[in-house]
């Protein structure tokens, strides 16, 4: 096995490099991940099932492939798999083909509840590694907690209204939703995109290369132009949240990594249209709202490269639920429009609560978005 602290310090890309060069074996990496999870998941409750035997067998297959001369882009990387999709989903099959080893199922909300920003296990709710009193967000709760706790460097998620980006923001990590339609949707109306949670943007970029190798490259030419909006024209965002996200963006700008453009981006509240699509009751009003927001974003992107907002309008709530607050207020507009979006850690509020900086790019500019995130991650 690897030394546990060494394993926890390695990115997915670094693990794959070591395995491909024969410096460590996939079996050693996976054994370390399993031992660490057995030791530390009691304090997090990120996993609902551990697949130790199948993980070790899969790691042995990776080692045999490497010994035979293969080079796999994510060789030997342990991953958590969102329980609601399982190991046979499209993105997980692609990740396994790239050398990843699924080690277990990560928690999701219990069916039939009125809110989705938590994870359920037979040991109790999933806890946020930053503070056990906070919800980790959801619905990819266990995936976010497993990555933030260092149990795995990558975990899969799915994002129908913000379910990758919200838990990533509340657990202080990266959450990436690709352009809708780039990967097969997880629902019949195309709102729910597969996605990934990671500790660094480079690992999210490696994920995209593995699951969507034909994703069009979009170069980052010069200094990116960014429009900031704390509300998108309709959300009620806490001032402390908006200030923390804006300060992170300002640090990026002061480092010369982006140029801030003053321009309003005012969308119509997407709630009625999102709800109508999910319940199968769309109307002309639904189509009109979606069309209006799409047109506003087309105009906005004529003069800018990225739109930036806070990821959520409020900080993590406790395990008693969000009350009347809508955690998805700033994210679900882009499930309707299909734009790629990513959350970066953006520091904390004065009370120490984690804040995410939410970045949105043009359709199919996923690679540009990830490149920007890689450049900006330390500065934010």
Image (spheres, helix red, strand yellow):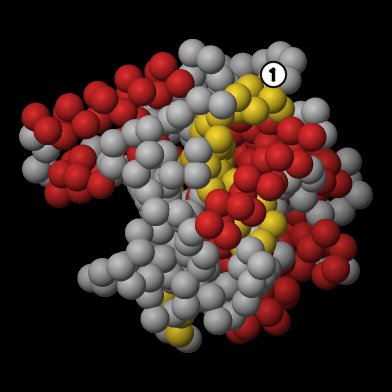
The location of residue 197, given as percent across then percent down, is 58, 51
Is residue 76 depicted above or below 227 in this figure?
below
Residue at screen point 55% across, 35% down: 228
Read off the residue under disc 1: 220
Disc 1 secondary structure class = loop
Q: Please identify the quarter of the rendering in which residue 1 is found.
A: bottom right
Q: Is residue 142 visible?
A: no
Q: Residues within 10 Å of mark 1 (few under 14, many from 20)?
A: some
Percent from the top left, x then y, of residue 291? 24, 24
Which residue is painted at 15% across and 49% down in the image?
279
On the picture, is 236 further left or further right than 103?
left
Number of marks present in the image shown: 1
Q: Quadrant of the C terminus?
A: top right
Location of residue 354 by image quarter: bottom right
Q: Residue at x 52, y 65 (%)?
A: 315
Q: Position of residue 95 (x, y in %)?
A: 58, 42
Asked if residue 125 lies left or right of residue 270, the reply is right
Please provide percent x and percent y for residue 83: 43, 62
Q: Nearer the viewer, residue 21 or 163?
A: 163
Q: In the image, is 307 to the left or to the right of 76?
A: left
Q: Is residue 337 visible?
A: yes
Q: Which quadrant of the view contains residue 367?
A: top right
């Amino acid at each position: 096995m690897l030394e546990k602290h060494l394993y926890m310090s390695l990115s997915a890309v670094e693990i794959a490099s070591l395995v491909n060069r024969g410096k460590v074996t996939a079996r050693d990496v996976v054994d370390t991940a399993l031992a660490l999870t057995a030791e530390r998941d009691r304090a997090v409750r990120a996993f609902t099932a551990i697949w130790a035997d199948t993980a070790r067998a899969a790691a042995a297959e990776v080692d045999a492939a490497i010994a035979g001369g293969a080079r796999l882009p994510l060789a030997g990387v342990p991953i958590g798999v969102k329980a609601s999709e399982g190991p046979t989903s499209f993105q997980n099959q692609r990740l396994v083909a790239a050398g990843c080893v699924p080690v277990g199922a990560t928690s999701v909300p219990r069916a039939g509840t009125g809110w989705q920003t938590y994870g359920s296990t037979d040991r109790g709710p999933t806890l946020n590694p930053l503070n056990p009193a906070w919800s980790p967000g959801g619905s990819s709760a266990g995936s976010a907690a497993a990555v933030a706790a260092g149990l795995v460097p990558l975990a899969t998620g799915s994002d129908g209204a913000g379910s990758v980006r919200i838990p990533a923001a509340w657990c202080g990590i990266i959450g990436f939703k690709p352009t809708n339609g780039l990967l097969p949707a997880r629902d019949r109306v195309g709102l729910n995109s597969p996605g990934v949670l990671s500790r660094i943007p480079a690992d999210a970029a490696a994920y995209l290369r593995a699951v969507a190798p034909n994703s069009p490259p979009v170069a980052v030419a010069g200094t990116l132009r960014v429009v900031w909006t704390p509300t998108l024209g309709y959300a009620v965002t806490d001032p402390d949240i908006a200030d923390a996200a804006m300060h992170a963006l300002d640090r990026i700008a002061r480092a010369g990594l982006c140029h801030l453009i003053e321009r309003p981006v005012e969308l119509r509240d997407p709630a009625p249209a999102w709800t109508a699509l999910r319940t199968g009751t769309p109307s002309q009003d639904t189509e009109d709202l979606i069309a209006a927001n799409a047109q506003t974003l087309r105009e906005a992107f004529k003069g800018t490269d990225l739109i930036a907002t806070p990821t959520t309008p409020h900080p993590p709530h406790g395990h008693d639920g969000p009350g009347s607050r809508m955690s998805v207020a700033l994210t679900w507009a882009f499930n309707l429009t299909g734009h790629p979006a990513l959350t970066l850690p953006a520091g904390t509020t004065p009370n120490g609560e984690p804040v995410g900086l939410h970045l949105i790019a043009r359709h199919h500019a996923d690679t540009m978005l990830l490149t920007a995130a890689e450049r900006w991650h330390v500065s934010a």
